[in-house]
Amino acid sequence: MEMQDVTLRAREVRALLAAGSGEAALLLLYLRGGGTLDDAAKALGFDARQLDYASASLRQLGLLPERVPAHLQPSAAPAYSEQDIAREYGASSEFPAIVGEAQRRLGRVLSTEELKILLGVYRYLGLPAEVISLLIHYCISRSRARGAGRMPSLRMIEQEAYRWADSGIETMEQAAAYMQRELRRQSRAGRICEILQVSARLTPGEETFLRDWIDWGFDDDVIAKAYEKTRLATGALKWAYMNAILRSWHEQGFTSLQQVEAGDQKPAARAAAPKNPVQQHGGALSGVEKSAVERMLHKELPKEG
């Protein structure tokens, strides 16, 4: 292909010189000249690891705006070696500081395998050092919320890092906004657990139910109403049963108790009730609700804890 003339700004030149990576400089010139990442390895004679380091270096310098593809899996990341770790320590990168911060927060020295995971978060995902610091803090806070003294593994931190990368989180502001949303979600989940009279230590399936209910925007009194109906109908908290009730309200566009109670009174809803689809207990469920519960309980739902 015919390459175009390339002009670099002084700031970009200074950044490249500070990084000390000739491969990154070559890649930037190639891309600015009209080349693509897909063709770069062949055009520049790079192997997969050289291309990974060069592109990650440009992302760290803010010179490569393209994001890694969404829905990446850790298994797709390069297999980093001890030599890669040593190379990163020898380069003028932020990786040693990231390692120091992680070890300080986790209260222990990271193993070689854990260093490889952290290097993947930094190099392969291209998350900035300050965002990785917030990521580690966030994961530690979540673990401690599940029990005093609990700490996340590097694999758990890696999984959360991939979620952040898939969500396009690459700045301090974006990370802070995400953390605030999740803190509000956790606070809301805690209130729902109080309504249901259960501990905050939930199974993954139960956490999925809670996340859906929160995303559906129900008021606390709606959750309490669904819980009451579930206990009247089954004698206990049956997560799948309660989820079917709430899903039926969600599909009808209900979010407030007023809407739910108004929907219960509709003649059409009573007329729609099938004959004995769900055992009644004091008329706890309306016709639409009974029909929805019966239908949804036959679907594949997250298993109860």
Image (cartoon, rainbow, N blue to C red):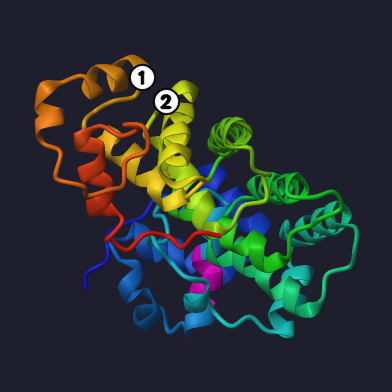
Question: In the image, is 31 to the left or to the right of 253?
Answer: right
**Residue 118: percent from left, percent from top:** 68, 66
Residue at figure coordinates x 24%, y 24% from the top left: 264
Question: In the image, is 146 to the left or to the right of 166?
Answer: right
Q: Residues within 10 Å of mark 1 (few under 14, many from 20)?
A: some
Question: In the image, is 5 to the left or to the right of 18?
Answer: left
Which is nearer the N-term, disc 2 or disc 1?
2
As drawn, the label of residue 222 is 2
Cα–Cα gap, marks 2 and 1: 6 Å
As drawn, the label of residue 256 is 1
Magenta portion: prevailing SS class: helix
Residue at figure coordinates x 33%, y 14% from the top left: 258
Per the image, label 1 sits on a secondary structure element best described as loop
Question: In the image, is 168 to the left or to the right of 82?
Answer: left
**Residue 170: percent from left, percent from top:** 53, 45
Q: Which residues are magenta?
A: 50-55
